[in-house]
Structure formats: structure tokens, C-alpha cells
Image: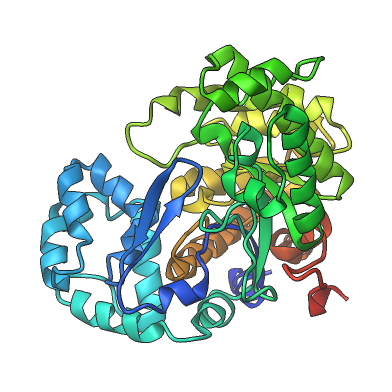
Amino acid sequence: MSSRDLRSLIDATPWVDTHEHLVEERQRLRSGGYTFPELMTGGSLTIPSSWTALLVDYSLQDLASAGMPRSAIAELTREERSPVEQWDAAAEYLQAARATGYLRAVDLTTERLFGMRLSRETCEAVDARLRALRVEGYYAHVLCDVSNVARAQVHSIECDPFCETQTPELLQQDLALVPLAMGRHAPAEQASGIEVGSLDDYLAVLEWCFERYAARAVAAKCVWAYLRPLAVDVPDVPPRREFLRLREGIADLRERRRVEDFLFQRCVDLATAAGLPVKLHLGYLAANGDRRLRHVYDHVRDVTPIVQANPRTTFVLMHMAWPQQEQLLALAKHQPNVVVDLCWAWILAPLATEDFVQRFLTCVPATKLLCFGGDYLVVENVVGHAEIARRGLQAALERLVARGWLTSDAALALVPLLMHGNAERIFPPRLADGSEPLDAK
């Protein structure tokens, strides 16, 4: 096998993209930016219409890490500024962070979409071409035609707990468990028509959500690592009193955790009954200065009792649990119901991810690894991330062949398994309208 053979196969093989946060395409067709409320935190998110939309997913955080003041970041994406003014405001920090995975994905995106690298000289042209790109059907063009993604799984933070997508053949959907498992979810309660006056009422809301959405979902996704530690201690007795105190806003931390842990386990039970894997965010947190970062170093330890207490549930542990990847390898090797997902990892820690693929394949069965998820709100950036992941997977397999660990034929045989075969087996073979994809029949 030559390096060219492996590269050609990887380039020709479609990804099943197992994790995105993409907003619906129609929202990106607006002439201005798109701002929407984010239910989990109670804040709002904005995707600008300018070229700075490419920085919204993570690159802005590396600019902050490089020292760019928060006030300057807020000003950077203002629509009133010209592309060059926006570039000049960020130039010093862009230069400092240009070699990170976040910014490398941006460079590859503009190079592959428009044939130019983002710079002061090209930012006006990139801005104009990004605006021209956004016409009806452009999601399919960016994902399928340019990124060679067969379809993507979306955890929508725009439409919670489930997105009734207009493109179910392209965007499979997760059923979001947060804030559903936190004991209060006004949209779900209103949609269900159930007036919540007790814990039993709220459990009926959970059941209604799974009855309505599970048959169209590919997984249940829990992202409460951004809100609390992952350790769960499910109470033996339903926490009815604590639930009422939570709803009244007077529950203390211990009481809130008892309610959350109980509801989380109920969601796991419902997901398992519906045949849905449970995705858990593990590892690094995206925002700068988040005090919950300290919990990251306990994530693998904290979820071990959860996966062992639910052996019938498939748990998809996300983001390589970076920087706890060695502990994650041990858990994946030990537990038959654990699957590892490299979503986000290729731009978060590119070289660590390349090394992890080699370690995984020499330690854990290859059928338990999912190799790509862009983890973006902005679809354009999937182009660059998908390319980074392809080259990283190629390098990892080449090194295993060079060391004599894999034969050339064995390395080639792993490509379709890692790029889409595992995902097609692990997740229900259905689209967001309940049908099956044509290539799964």
C-alpha cells in the first residue's frame, strides 16, 4: 500500500458526521446575522452574516486565550464594521493563534471553498463569497459535495429538546436531555399540555417527549458537563419533596442534585427502551474562564459508575474526553457498552487525536470508535474540520503500518469502518422524519 492509495480511499469515503450543533439552513439565508435564545444557559447566541461567522465556533475563544479583550471580541462581529476593519481589530490575535486547530480549520475552509486563505488582502472577497454561498440548498453542497459527509447528527441548541428539521435526509437529530433532566423545561411542558404540579407530572412530560421524538432521533444527548459535575447518585426513593422545592426555586445544591440524578436516570431508561444510545459530553469546556473546568479532570471517573449501572445502554463518550484520553481508553476497553467519539477532538487537540487513534486501535476493538463530528453551529467550518480529520486518520493508519502493527490491507479495511460503518451500526438507521437513509436499506 502506498500513501497515495490510503489517501485516495480516505478522500473517496464519506463521513457519517456524528456531532454538530448546526442551526437550520433557513436561518442562515437571512441578509443580516441570526440571533437565537439558548435554553440551557438562558443566554443568546449570534451568528453574524460577515466573514467573522467563521470565527464564532471556537476560534474566538483562542483569540481570547491569546489576550484579545472581551469587549473587543464583542465589537469584532458588529455588522456595521467593514471586513477590513474587522480583520484589523483581530489581526494581532489571529496571528498568535493561527497554528491552532481552530484556526487551521478556518484556513482550510476558505481554501477549499474559495481557493484563498483568509487574510487582510482577501477578507473582503471571502466575505462576499460567503454571502453569495448562502442560497437554498447550500448545506447539502457544503456537507455532501465539498466535505464528503453523507449526513450529520445534530444536537440542536436552537430548537430544544428536538429539532423538526426541514432537511431530515441530511440532518439527523439528537433528543436533548439538558435542560430536560434539570427539572424544568417550559417549551416541553407547554407542548405536552401537561401542567406540572408534582414529580409524577414532570415524569409524564419526559415520557411524552420520548413518545413524540424518540422514533425520529438517533441518540439522546446530555451536555450537563457545562453545568455541573458528571457524578450521579440516583436516590432509591423518588425525590418528590425536593422536586417541589426545586420548582419553587428554594432547593439547595444537594436537593437539586437528587432531582437531577433521578431524572437523568429516568431519561437513560427511556432512551434505552427506545433503542437510543446516550451521548455524554466529556472533557474540555469551550468557554474561556469557566470555573467548571476543574470538573473535566474527573469526567471519566465520574461516568464509570453510570455506564456500569446501565449495561443495556450504549454510551457514546464524546470529544476523546480530552485531556483524559488514557483513562477513556481504559474504560472503553473494559466496558462493552462504551463507544468513543472523536467529535471536536481533531481541532481541539489535533496531534493528541492522531496519537489517540493509534493507541485506540492497538488497545480497544476498532468497532467502538467514531472518527468525526464537526461540533459546529456554522456549517461552512465543517469543510476544514473534515479535511483535518481525514489527514489525521491517514497519518495514524500510516504510522501503524510503518511500525508493522497493521498490514496495508488491514489499514485499508479499517477506513470505511471508522468513517461511517461504526456509526451506521451503533445508531438507529433512521432519519429525522423516521425513515431510513437510502444507503442503509
Q: Nearer the viewer, residue 428 or 39?
A: 39
Q: Quadrant of the C terminus?
A: bottom right
Residue at x 72%, y 30% (from the top left corner): 263
Residue 2 coordinates in the image, percent (x, y): 63, 70
Residue at x 73%, y 60% (from the top left corner): 411
Residue 417 makes an appearance in the image: no
Residue 362 makes an appearance in the image: yes
Horizontal relation, residue 294 to residue 337: left or right:
left
> In the displayed structure, would residue 306 be above or below residue 190?
above
Q: Quadrant of residue 313?
A: top right
Horizontal relation, residue 382 to residue 316: left or right:
left
> In the displayed structure, would residue 199 be above or below residue 78?
above
Q: Nearer the viewer, residue 16 or 154?
A: 154
Residue 248 coordinates in the image, percent (x, y): 55, 24
> In the displayed structure, would residue 340 be above or below residue 402?
above
Q: Quadrant of the N terminus?
A: bottom right
Q: Quadrant of residue 364?
A: top right
Horizontal relation, residue 86 to residue 393: left or right:
left
Horizontal relation, residue 101 to residue 206: left or right:
left
Residue at x 49%, y 66% (from the top left corner): 382
Residue 49 coordinates in the image, percent (x, y): 31, 72
Residue 354 coordinates in the image, percent (x, y): 55, 49
> In the displayed structure, would residue 292 be above or below residue 164?
above
Q: Give the colouring mode of the picture.
A: rainbow
